[in-house]
Amino acid sequence: MHLPVADVTLSPRTGCTRAHWEAAADALLAAVEPYAAEGGALYHLPGDRQSWSGRLSDGLEGYARTLLLAAFRRDESALQRYAEGLAAGTAGVWPRIEDRGQPLVEAASIALALRLTRPLLWDRLDDGVRQRAAAWLGDALTAEAWPCNWELFPVTVGGFLDEIGHETVASRKAIDRGLERIEDWYLGDGWYTDGDGRKFDYYNGWAMHLYPMLHAWLADDERLLDLYGGRLSRHLEDYARLFGGDGAPMHQGRSLTYRFATTAPLWLGALTDRTPLAPGETRRLASGALKYFLERGAVDDRGLLTLGWHGPDPAVLQGYSGPASPYWAAKGFLGLLLPPDHPVWTATEEPGPAERGDATTPIVPPNWLVQSTASDGLVRLHNHGSEDVRYDPYYTRLAYSTATAPSPSYDNSVIIGDHPGRTEIEPLGVGDGWAASRHLAGAGARVTSVVLVRGAVEVRAFRVTGAGPGTPVRVTGWTAEEEGLRAELLPAVGLSDTLTGITGDEATLFVALARLTGQANPVPLGETVSVEPYGAGELAVRWTDGPEVRVLFDDPGSGVSVWTSRSANAAGCWATPT
């Protein structure tokens, strides 16, 4: 992909300006054009893989997701091609929108694109095409959605249809129904779970916040703007911390092949003036992600987005991933709706959170602890509250980072007997430099896990109950495949040099020291911290350059108490299961 020369004055960290985003959008649109079929109604991108929805639906996906990119780009010549495709698609080519079917997803992208570009596309269509398109979209108003972010697709379609005066009663019912539904999943501090349970990932940003906020903005609804805008702004305080110094987003959750769609909520905050981030920081984070992927094989020699993370990688795909699925990366171009003279485009880039200094950030709703180090720009996410067993290993590992991927060999796990899984995760609290949870490890074993962090160093403690005496236990840590990364794991309590141990007659405590770092010559891990157990119920952690931290495992309440020597009353922070 040919991009303009880097502008290191305006963008000293990425070199990217608005011109780079425009050029990337233009190149992506030009690359898919040869694969248009059926009068432009379908885009059949090359490759052997099909999603579980089949070739016809995959072709519609290709149309809808690249149309969304053209809408953000506001490219009139491209939009004309998509207008012709809309006419052909609604003349009988496209599959109907039915209950829980993929066309419902794609209808939302089409409706949003039509709403964003109404004077350029919709208003120029023949009346017959408009009537057919409105009728096709209308099925989305009553189609049953999967109980997750899908509930917002009828909202998005309804917003457009209401605006053009088509089935206004049904449209408003669909809007109200979907917006009411997501209230069940809002857990505060800007965080949603993606449906029932505790499913936290990027869908917070590119779905749960994006669709309601864009609807409120396009409808100019101040009440909804205040409601969803407040949530978005709070979310961005945490979200901005999930990008590494090299621009990489956190490698956690499903649909990772959407890549720089992770930047959508950053742009959304700027677009709606609901963001805590400075304009130069917003562009730095977003451009960093775009540059990160474009430099690592996201686009092949045909100019097409590949099915993967860097280059092609089946490990990050799901059954619903088809050839055009990566083009939900189009959401990352939302910033092109901002005019060229907006401060986001004219301000000098500012460093992101991972570059400004070492930090540990507790995020309460998902019970996550985010750990970042400025020396190497690495961000690590300690997961003590997110679970979706359908998409393991991207939800149930103990930790994720911006520089590593979950491995088939169960990295960042505690393995009890022959059970490597982690299910029924119960959050037990998160605080300054620590997080805790409890989970089921199979065969009746329960594991209470606590992580304490300082700098790049982690102390991982596991209290195992219910496994029976003599049960083997193995602890794993980070896998470092990238050049310049160093992954370490040392035994501290109850573990041999092979990071294995066995349970006793009662509760048994196992502790390991871990570190993932890009520093060339860090202080030896064993010299950074010392650990002393007091039976299986209490642990003292003494940081070489910091305070002593005490961890108390509480049997009656199944909770964890953590306090430090520097606290005013030494009472610490107490947490029990939610």
Image: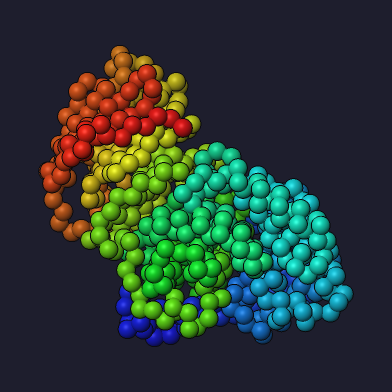
Quarter of the image where one finds residue 131: bottom right
Name of the residue lying farthest toward the top:
505
Residue 486 versus residue 550: which sits nearer the camera?
550
Left or right of residue 80: residue 70: left
Give the total of numbered labels: 0
Which residue occupies 37% across, 18% down? 556
The x and y percentages for residue 520 are 18, 59
**On the picture, is 210 further left or further right than 112?**
left
Quarter of image, res 29: bottom right
Indicate left or right for 443 with 37 as reference.
left
Residue 441 in the image, given as x and y percentages of width and height:
43, 28
Q: How is the image coloured?
A: rainbow
Please, is residue 533 above or below residue 33 in the view? Answer: above
Residue found at the very far front of the displayed protein: 223
- Identify the residue at horizontal 48%, vertical 79% (top origin): 342
Observer able to see residue 30:
yes
Q: Residue at x 17, y 29 (%)?
A: 532
In the displayed structure, 113 sits above or below 507; it is below
Q: Nearer the viewer, residue 220 or 198?
A: 220
Q: x, y percentage for residue 191?
A: 49, 49
Q: Is residue 233 above or below residue 415?
A: below
- 565 vs 554: above or below: below
Q: Is residue 277 left or right of residue 132?
A: left
Closer to the camera in the image, 315 or 237: 237
| The quadrant where residue 421 appears | top left
Location of residue 363 in the rendering, given as x and y in whole percent from the top left corner: 40, 47
Residue at (59%, 74%) from the top-left corner? 72
Q: Is residue 325 visible?
A: no
